[in-house]
Amino acid sequence: MNKDLDHKELLCIFIVMKVIITESQKNRTIIKWLNSEYGDLTPYEIEEHPNQIFFMKDEKVLFNYNKKPKTVGISYDKIWSFLEYFFGLEYEEIQDITKEWVEEHYKLEVTSSDKNYW
């Protein structure tokens, strides 16, 4: 993916190139995109938040994992809003896909996923 394009430009490209795909194809495509863009996040644990693992890239938290309830908070600015606008996903779809992605790629047990603002 060209890093010089912003979300709005990518949305325009997506609209022009839009094709009919099945739900499972769409989900696989989104998870591939998540892996290519955010598959190399570095986990950080800090003393002040012993139940949290922060997954970061370029000094920015992209998601956090809360160990006790096993929940994930996904960055709204960097990930959630992109899935919402570029892929046209609804709230529950984003919850399901990000939960699946974190479980599969980062091997964490997740009960739920939600957007988070940092």
Image: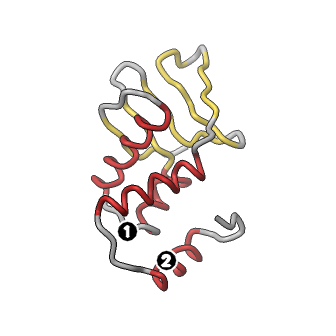
Question: Which image quarter is the C terminus in?
Answer: top right
Q: Considering depth in this image, is 88 or 25 the residue closer to the camera?
A: 25
Q: Residue at x 52, y 56 (%)?
A: 33
- Tag of residue 14: 2
Tell me the quarter of the picture where residue 112 sits: top left
Query: Where does residue 100 sit, x and y in percent of width and height?
Result: 37, 42
Residues packed near mark 2 inside 10 Å, few (<14), some (14 to 19) or many (20 plus): few
Where residue 68 sits, quadrant-wise, is top left
Does 76 sit left or right of 89 as displayed?
A: right
Q: Left or right: where does residue 38 sit relative to residue 89?
A: right
Whole-number angstrom distance, CA of label 2 to CA of label 1: 10 Å
Q: How far from the left and from the top, in percent, is residue 30?
A: 44, 57
Residue 46, labelled with which disc? Answer: none
Percent of width and height locating residue 74: 46, 44
* Residue type marked 2: Phe
Identify which residue is drawn at 27% across, 53% down: 92
Q: Is residue 3 placed above or below 98 in the rendered structure? A: below
- Which quadrant, please, contains the N terminus? bottom right
Q: Is residue 24 above or below residue 52?
A: below
Measured along the vertical axis of the image, is residue 31 above or below residue 63? below
The residue nearer to you, when weighing 29 against 110, is: 29
Q: Of tags 2 and 1, which is closer to the observer?
A: 2
Q: Which residue bears the numbered disc 1? A: 88
Residue drawn 54% across and 80% down?
A: 13
- The front one of 104 and 41 is 104
Q: At which x and y percent is residue 6?
A: 63, 69
